[in-house]
Structure formats: C-alpha cells, structure tokens
C-alpha cells in the first residue's frame, strides 16, 4: 500500500511541475474517435493489457434514442474492474468519454465533464444529458488513471437524447 501511495504522489508531483514550466507546450492535437492522440515524449509508463481484452457498452447501443437520465452499462472482457489505486495485474477502472475524442494516452486521463471517472469500480451509471446528439466512448485506466498498452477503448457510439 505504501508503494502505491508513493507512486500516486510522484505522478501528482510530476503533473504539478510539468504545469509550472515557463515554456508553453503546443496543445495536443485533437484526436479522432478512431485514432488516438499521439503519445508525448514525457509520457508516463503504461501498464500492459492482455491480448484480446476489450471494453464495450452493454447499453445503450449505437444509434439508440434515449431519455435523460441515460442508463449506461459498461462491459469488459479479459480484465477485471477494480478501484483506482489498486495495482493489480490485468485490471483497471472505466472512464466515460462524452462528446470528445481520446485523450493523450501516455498521461493520466483528465477528470472533467467530458472525461468521467469511475474510480470506485462502477460498471454502470445514469447520466443527465441535454436533448440532442451525443457520443459516448469507454477508456480503461490503470490504477493511476493512465490508459493501458495497448489501450482498452470501446467503439465510439452515437445516441440521441429526446
């Protein structure tokens, strides 16, 4: 447990220090749903994922018309869902990407309104969305919220909220 705490603190210090640099880095290129953002030179080590592992949506399905709040259920094959901070082989936790592309894969997944973390090992949620078209995508993060190598990312689905 002490080693996990130390690793989390080191990542936090790295992120703070990298944000304090006087030189402004170029903003990362916007990633498309089918092509992840490039891995930056300062990327952190990534946890290996087993061959054939995958994440996917159980509900809703691509093209569904739904009402808000939207019931969303996440699926996973070949790995186990565990809470953030749990350093266990072939495991991670879900992140739901709403109306955005993939983040930089060599860094911790952002936590904001378009990158929703499920560090409590949840495999479902209800999400309030405004009426209209929305995209959803899953990205599994390791115990430090860093995508695996190779990344476990679902197909991006489109839904319409009535």
Image (cartoon, rainbow, N blue to C red):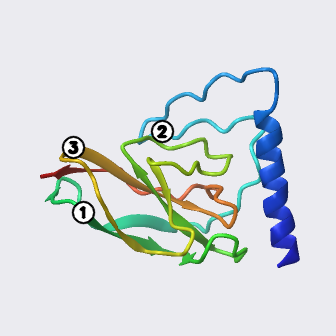
Residue 52, compared with residue 116, is above or below; it is below
Determine the image quadrant of residue 2: bottom right
Q: Residues within 10 Å of mark 1 (few under 14, many from 20)?
A: few
Q: Earlier in the sequence, mark 1 or mark 3?
A: 1
Q: x and y percent of residue 57 in the render?
A: 34, 65
Numbered disc 3: secondary structure:
strand
Of the numbered discs 3 and 2, the one sitting upstream in the chain is 2
Label 2, label 1: how far apart the Cα atoms are = 29 Å
Q: Nearer the viewer, mark 3 or mark 2?
A: 3
Contact between marks 1 and 3 (CB within 8 A): the answer is no
The x and y percentages for residue 29 are 55, 27
Task: Tell me the residue at 16%/60% (across/down).
Answer: 67
Local crowd size for mark 3, using a 10 Å CA cut-off: few (<14), some (14–19), many (≥20) = some
At 68% across and 47% down in the image, what residue appears?
107
Look at mark 1 in the image and give the residue it sits on.
69
137 displayed left or right of 132: right
Residue at 27% in and 52% down = 129
* Residue ID for mark 2: 35
Circles 3 and 2, Cβ within 8 Å, touching? The answer is no
- Look at mark 3 in the image and give the residue it sits on: 133
For marks 1 and 3, give the one nearer the viewer. Answer: 1
Q: Examine the rendering and report whether any part of residue 54 can be seen.
A: yes
């Amino acid at each position: 447990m002490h080693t996990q705490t130390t690793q989390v603190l080191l990542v936090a210090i790295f992120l703070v220090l990298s944000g304090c640099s006087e030189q402004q880095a170029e903003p990362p290129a916007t990633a498309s749903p089918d092509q992840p953002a490039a891995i930056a030179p300062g990327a952190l080590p990534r946890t290996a994922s087993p061959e054939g592992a995958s994440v996917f949506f159980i509900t809703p399905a691509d093209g569904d018309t739904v009402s808000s709040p939207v019931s969303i259920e996440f699926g996973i094959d070949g790995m186990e869902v565990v809470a953030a901070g749990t350093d266990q082989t072939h495991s991670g936790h879900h992140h739901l990407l709403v109306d955005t592309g993939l983040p930089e894969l060599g860094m911790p997944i952002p936590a904001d309104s378009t990158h929703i973390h499920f560090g409590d090992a949840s495999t479902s949620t209800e999400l309030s969305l405004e009426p209209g078209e929305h995209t959803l995508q899953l990205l599994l993060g390791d115990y430090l919220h860093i995508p695996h190598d190779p990344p476990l990312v679902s197909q991006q689905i489109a839904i319409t909220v009535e």
